[in-house]
Amino acid sequence: MSTVVETHDHGHHGPAKGLTRWLYTTNHKDIGTLYLWFSCLMLFIGGSMAMVIRAELFQPGLQIVEPEFFNQMTTNHGLIMVFGVIMPAFVGLANWMLPMQIGAPDMALPRLNNLSFWLLPMAFGILISTLFMPEGGPNFGWTFYAPLSTTYAPSTVNYFIFSVHIMGISSILGSINIITTIFNMRAPGMTLMKMPLFVWSWLITAYLLIAVMPVLAGVVTMMLMDINFGTSFFNAGGGGDPVLFQHVFWFFGHPEVYIMILPAFGIASHIIETFSRKPIFGYTSMVYAMSSIAILSFVVWAHHMFTVGMPLAGELFFMYSTMLIAIPTGVKVFNWIATMYRGSITFETPMLFAIAFVALFTIGGFSGLMLAIVPADFQYHDTYFVVAHFHYVLVPGSLFGIIAGVYYWLPKWTGNMYDETLGQLHFWLTFISVNLTFFPMHFVGLAGMPRRYPDYALQFADFNMVISVGAFLFGITQLLLVFIVIKSIRAGKKAKPEVWEGAGELGLEWTLESPAPYHTFTVQPQVK
Amino acid sequence: MAYLSKFSFKFYQIIFLILPATLLGEAADYNMSVGVTEVSREIFDLHMLIFWVCVWIGVVVFGIMFWSLWKYRKSKGAVAADFDDNFWLEIGWTVAATLILVVIAVPSTQVMVKAYDDAEGEINIMVTGHQWKWHYKYLEDDISFFSNLSTDPEQIYNKMPKGEFYLKEVDEPLVIPINKRIRFLITGNDVIHSWWVPDFAVKQDAIPGFINTAWTNVPEPGIYRGNCTELCGIRHAFMPVVVRAVEQEEYDAWVVEKVMLAEQEKLLTSKEWTTEELFERGEGFYQTNCVACHQVNGQGIPPVFPALEGSQITLNDAPRQIEILMEGVQGAAMASYAGYSEVDIAAVITYTRQAWSNGENGDGVIVTPQDIVAYKNKTEL
């Protein structure tokens, strides 16, 4: 992709000083930075909860926490990681990179952008504050199945509901902004089928968010009504149905799963083509594959519910539709490998994370295929096999995608290269510990250990100890990431505009100087 | 290990290479239970089939990927080729992926149809999930009982060594005869639970207000252990499932005995009970059913589980205490105990009103089985 960039001085538009810069900012780069640091903070809060869980499960018996607090930890760990880490991190990357990738000066709706970010600390402040209330926080799992989350919930569930509402508003506003930006602010000449794949992945993701966040808002509102206003949506005693909750929740929940992986697909595509020094193989099929995954995600939701007693035809329908998703996902993996084939490959930290992403996400995909098989799912359902599966797609999947993206674009943000030696160390420690943590979960799950158990039978003791050791190592290792990022912000080898060898050809962001000025593309570039 | 098939032996070897041998004690437990029923065996075979399909796809895909990474590394002087699309290759691997899925879908559908057969059973058992125990009711015979975790809390809190069946043992297992078609009608009393016995490959959610069905036909006598697999609150991990499958004659004898015991229980209601007798019986009931939440010393775990010692209800309000035991507390963890006998309920109420310092500080009202009968008569009108 060749471009013409007009440069002129924008030094007089520098950021405001002090705290107000961050409170009032409408600059896409500042807001991107806020999102990413918020996500980082939440990663350590949600991660600490995982450490409590793993400490308790280190040995059989109850030693560190009581089951009530354990349930609060599993619930909040899930909620924070999904809504507070993965999603904001992708929005942060979108804020930073989308305008720069499409040659726009900023997001289309900058004030809305500020609002969508600042809603998040409110939402998570409310959610986390419940942990300090006498009755404790939400304790019914991140999937909050009724009636455990309604009739039998602590009264703090109302805070949880409002917190989810606020998160939902934030996501919807952010998505509106992203769609508007992509459709209206692309540089002249950048047709839809010339857009970078990260932009494509976010366009699709934003549509998914707008489609399903209102469904989530609906389901928590029904809960609110059941709890406080005497309705019976989910109460069989009043003519409702607890299973209705699950249908509505997963109608949101399954597209949500792809919301958390599609942007990582985009990031991995850029990194693999950059470090293979060869353009992405099958661009068109990559776009169609992501679109197919998004459309299919609306008709597979009940594969989370194979044991609720659906009729045979329903079980078979959701089995087949789920298996279909393996096709576009497989196509993406094949395309990445075909991009590497006959390339000229180097192994900088972003590439290492991207390769690990492809390999380990595929393992998560395999276990996903196994889980789709209904009769086998009767044995897997709600065991650690499921926990292993979704952690493989979310940690070495989504999180590795985010970390890879951070390493890849960090020199563009800070103007300094990160410390490559520390980056490689961070990768290898993370890679080893992530597998040590999540691979044995397949074994304990198959052997029959149910999920969300604070205590377990003796046969699972050895693997659980290994899992806990892996988890502690994984947790500590992520402090290294923070250190590397801060080090790169403060000093380091100066980065060139293209940062990575040959990247100048691959996207508009690499035509800008490093660090990217506070305002970029105030005159639109031309894309040929 | 005796049941390891040809496939799982290979699996064993692979794992052995990956993990330190120290992890593999004699009870190496890393794969799905083969189980004992026809359905569970077919599901196991299906599981291994998909597993090996995934392994072979993985070997090919990762093989090509790592070979490319190695062969085309820049440090060896690789120069990037200039191609970025191939229509027939894209079509080719899409079709290949589809064909593999069809190969998996066919046997999966066959096993599914078999597992999901909901015809009447020769024996029909109603399984009800309660917070946090299972209730079994035999629809053809007048037998029903609760099945509680029997692991000593001292073991859970690491105050004594853990037994062999730690958290997988109950006071009264479900008993079924072998070689009979058993149908389970599964429901929940409060929240959603899920009844799982891996060796039967039966896992069905127990949903309040709805009845799900599952079936099994067990060919071998034995004790089969499982769990609750849907998060149901604080003691989710502490409501295991234990099923004892026995020969038909043994089963018949068991039924006769259970029916007889039930008759005797009924007679006990009309018996005149002394405070000491009630206290003694109530103490036993309390240890089995109440200590998990209200604790041996009656202090509970406030604010979730209130203390019974010094509570105004246990001291001075016997009618309210009866009501709580019979109806449960809406919106709290306290479930209804109305499914137990009048004697047990009266005994445990009397026990909690006499135990600890409550006997000295309270009104000393004794609750008898007749009081419970009176309550039932009053509320049923």
Image (cartoon, grey):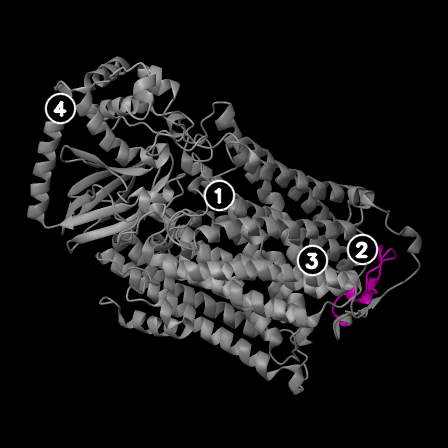
Viewer-nearest of labels 1 and 3?
1
**Sooner in the amino-acid sequence: mark 1 or mark 3:** 1
Residue B281: x percent and y percent? 20, 28
A283, A456: nearer the viewer: A456
Label 4 sits on residue:
B268
- Seen in the picture, residue B275 relative to A383 is either above or below; the reply is above
Label 4 close to label 2 by CB (< 8 Å): no
Q: Mark 2, chain letter?
A: A
Label 3 sits on residue:
A199
- What's the amino acid at mark 2? Ala
For label 1, the SS is loop
For label 2, the SS is loop
Q: Is residue A331 left or right of residue B203?
A: right
Local packing at callout 1 (Cα closer than 10 Å; few below 14, some 14-19, many 20+) is some
The answer to whether residue B167 shows anywhere in this view is yes
Q: Which residue is drawn at 25% across and 60% down?
A: B41
Label 1 sits on residue:
A143
A46, A61: nearer the viewer: A61
Q: Mark 4, chain letter?
A: B
- Where does the C terminus of chain A fall, quadrant-wise? bottom right
Magenta residues, start to end: A505-528
Label 3 close to label 4 by CB (< 8 Å): no
Viewer-nearest of labels 4 and 1?
4
Please identify the quarter of the rendering in which residue A524 is found: bottom right
- Where does the N terminus of chain A fall, quadrant-wise? bottom right
**Sooner in the amino-acid sequence: mark 2 or mark 1:** 2
Label 2 sits on residue:
A104
Q: Work out how far the residue at label 4 is from the one at label 2, CA to CA, in angstroms.
A: 84 Å
- What's the amino acid at mark 4? Leu
Q: Mark 3, chain letter?
A: A
